[in-house]
Amino acid sequence: MEEESKKTSINIWGCCVSRDSVAFRQNKYVVPRFIQGISPFTAFDGKKILLTIEEFSEYPQVHNFSKKCICHDASKSAVEYVKEGRADWALFDISEIRRSIYIWKDSGVLLTKNSKLSQMIDVLNAYFGGETPSEISPFLFSEASLRVAVEKLCDAFLKHFPTERIIFHEFYNVDCYLDEENILREFSVLQRAENEKQNVLIKKAAEICKKKFSGCHIIRMPDKTFADCRNRWGLSPLHYTSLYYDYAEKCISLILEGKSSEEEKEQLSVLYELYNEKMLSCCMWARKNGYRQKAHRAEEELTRARSLCAEEEQKLARLQSDCEGLQRTNVHILEENRALEREREELKENVSSLERERAQLAGTVSELQELRARLERREKQLTEEKNAMEETNERLGEKMRLQKEELGKKESALSKQRERSRQLQGELNALRGSRSYKIGRLITWLPRKIRGVFGRR
């Protein structure tokens, strides 16, 4: 505790650049309060809501510090929280002005957008009954709105920190970065365009801060500052090379010495020029390193190219040999082509002959189809005649049946008559053989005979 009491206490409002500048030589400083990720547009405006860190418990991967900053942004208590740190100094930057704003219109809530809040946005949407936020770009705010928001934040700070205890840290997005091979490269065209837009906004806000904090201490960023991909937070236009944090910490250390305003400005200017030269030297070294590596790569490429040339020459020799073989093959192929051409002509003739036969067959097919149609019609007629004959046969059959029945009846009657005739013949024969018949016959015959005899006379 005694060692901590010897350190200078500094409260920080801003982004990681200010925090990393103090942490560069953390054995010299203690930071009671640090607020990050809150835009002046949301620091006081919008409906106040009381959130707790526990409400974001479903996201253990997000550090409690980020959750705490979101809670202070929601309750509009960030400045009060910083004041409670009771530090000797306040390190202030306005870079968070570049962030977009989340607005829940129905709930009237404004919060600063950042990657951690975006991860946990479902918690807030559920808190507001399922309402999802709209996103407002900071570039859509008018200059008047920008001035009001920044001045309100500065006035709140001035209530708790006198200007002589405020260190205004002025820095911007950079367009170049040092890669893993220590080569200085540029960010993409789109990123540089976004950097320029954000820098214009930060510049306007910084000018307002410097007027409101008139008489404060100012740390300017060297013009030749560049980013570094090996920064512990990753590659970003605001994640600088360690040389910058060395510079910023030395500026803070110089300010804390309590020199006169003129002497402080002069020495800060010397540091600015010195580190500008250092940055420039690093840039030149990085560029030279890049040139050397490019030259080395070019030599390697040249060696590979020469090796490839030798391989290509060998391939060319093989290709020439292959070409001679191909020429011989081509001659053979030409002969085969001629033979194929002759076969093609023969095939054409055969095709023509087949076409003629096809035409003839088509005619024959047409005739067969007509014949088939006629046969079908004839078949239909015969079927109709057959049906008619079958009907006639049925009628004749019925008639013959009736005639057979009638004939049977007549045969039965004839049989009876024959039987009667036999009976009568029997009776007649019996009568003829009888004596009375013979007497009667004689009686009748004798007169006829007599008449005959007399008649002939």
Image (cartoon, rainbow, N blue to C red):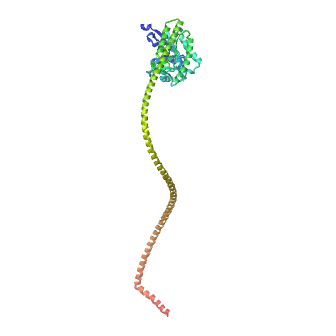
- Residue drawn at x 44%, y 12% is 26
Tell which of 7 and 342 is nearer to you: 342
Residue 203 visible in the snapshot = yes
- Residue drawn at x 41%, y 84% is 432
Tell which of 369 and 425 is nearer to you: 369
Q: Quadrant of the N terminus?
A: top left
Placement of 78 over or under 133, stated as above or below: above
Q: Number of marks in the image? A: 0
- Residue drawn at x 46%, y 21% is 292
Describe residue 95's horizontal placement relative to residue 316 as left or right. Answer: right
Placement of 204 over or under 302, stated as above or below: above
Tell which of 42 and 228 is nearer to you: 228
Describe residue 439's horizontal placement relative to residue 77 as left or right. Answer: left
| Residue 83 placement (x, y as % from top left) | 50, 11
Placement of 253 over or under 52, stated as above or below: above
Tell which of 371 and 221 is nearer to you: 221
Placement of 319 over or under 67, stated as above or below: below
Looking at the rendering, which quadrant does residue 145 occupy? Answer: top right
Residue 81 visible in the snapshot = no
**Outermost residue, bottom direction?**
457
| Residue 393 placement (x, y as % from top left) | 48, 65
| Residue 41 placement (x, y as % from top left) | 55, 18
| Residue 71 placement (x, y as % from top left) | 49, 18
